[in-house]
């Protein structure tokens, strides 16, 4: 009898393996991104310290959804554009890593759209989308 059950168990294992391999659950969240321009200082996270900005200028201000009473300061997120109101706005092949340096609600420079999850620097926004767009839908993960 045990030999008759063996093909069934092997088949079940193969199916489980294929499902686990090809259908990974996503750990990313979705939200919106807007952009903001200089001046960027002072910031809610690090004040007037210019060394807070990464040399590649890929940084952002946190919207209320991820601000977390300032705990988001210094956090790094992977961000990619997934859609926009105007087709062709996103650069879907581009994923960037940004650093949170400010709070959107209190940033010196005002965002291009209110209520966004993340307000990207002009450089960061331009890396994932057409900079003429006011906001885009994004996928992001810490």
Image (cartoon, rainbow, N blue to C red):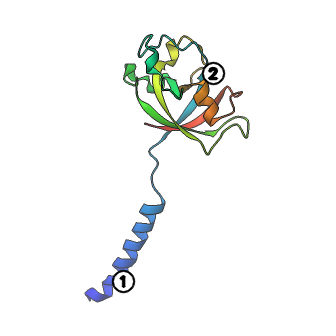
Q: Residue 113 carries which label?
A: 2
From the top left corner, tell me how far across and down residue 16 is, in percent. 40, 67
Decide if residue 10 is in sight here.
yes
Q: Which residue is drawn at 46% across and 28% down?
A: 99
Q: In this view, does 16 lie above or below 104?
A: below
Q: Residue furthest left?
A: 2
Q: In this view, does 53 lie to the left or right of 94?
A: left
Q: What element carries label 2?
A: loop
Badge 1 crowding class, 10 Å Cα cut-off, few under 14, some 14 to 19, many 20 or more, is few
Q: Which residue is drawn at 31% across and 83% down?
A: 5
From the top left corner, tell me how far across and down residue 106 is, in percent. 50, 12
Quarter of the figure with residue 139: top right
Q: Which residue is drawn at 44% across and 62% down?
A: 21
Q: Which residue is drawn at 54% across and 33% down?
A: 31
Decide if residue 117 is in sight here.
no
From the top left corner, tell me how far across and down residue 7 is, in percent. 36, 83
Proximity of marks 1 and 2: CB atoms separated by less than 8 Å: no
Marks 1 and 2, how far apart at CA: 58 Å
Q: Which mark is residue 7?
A: 1
Q: Is residue 102 left or right of residue 111?
A: left
From the top left corner, tell me how far across and down residue 2 is, in percent. 26, 86
Looking at the rendered image, the disc whose residue lies closer to the viewer, 1 or 2, is 2
Where is the C terminus found, in terms of image quarters? top left
């Amino acid at each position: 009898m045990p030999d008759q059950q063996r093909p069934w168990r092997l088949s079940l294992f193969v199916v489980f393996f294929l499902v686990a391999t090809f259908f990974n659950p996503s750990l990313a969240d979705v939200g919106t991104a807007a952009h903001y321009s200089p001046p960027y200082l002072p910031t809610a996270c690090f004040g007037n310290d210019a060394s807070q900005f990464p040399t590649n200028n890929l940084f952002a201000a946190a919207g209320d959804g991820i601000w977390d009473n300032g705990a988001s300061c210094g956090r790094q997120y992977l961000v990619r554009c997934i859609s926009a109101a105007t087709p062709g706005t996103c650069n879907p092949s581009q994923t960037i890593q940004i650093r949170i340096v400010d709070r959107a609600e209190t940033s010196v420079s005002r965002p291009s759209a209110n209520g966004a999850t993340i307000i990207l620097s002009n450089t960061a926004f331009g890396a994932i989308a057409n900079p003429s767009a006011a906001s885009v839908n994004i996928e992001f993960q810490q």
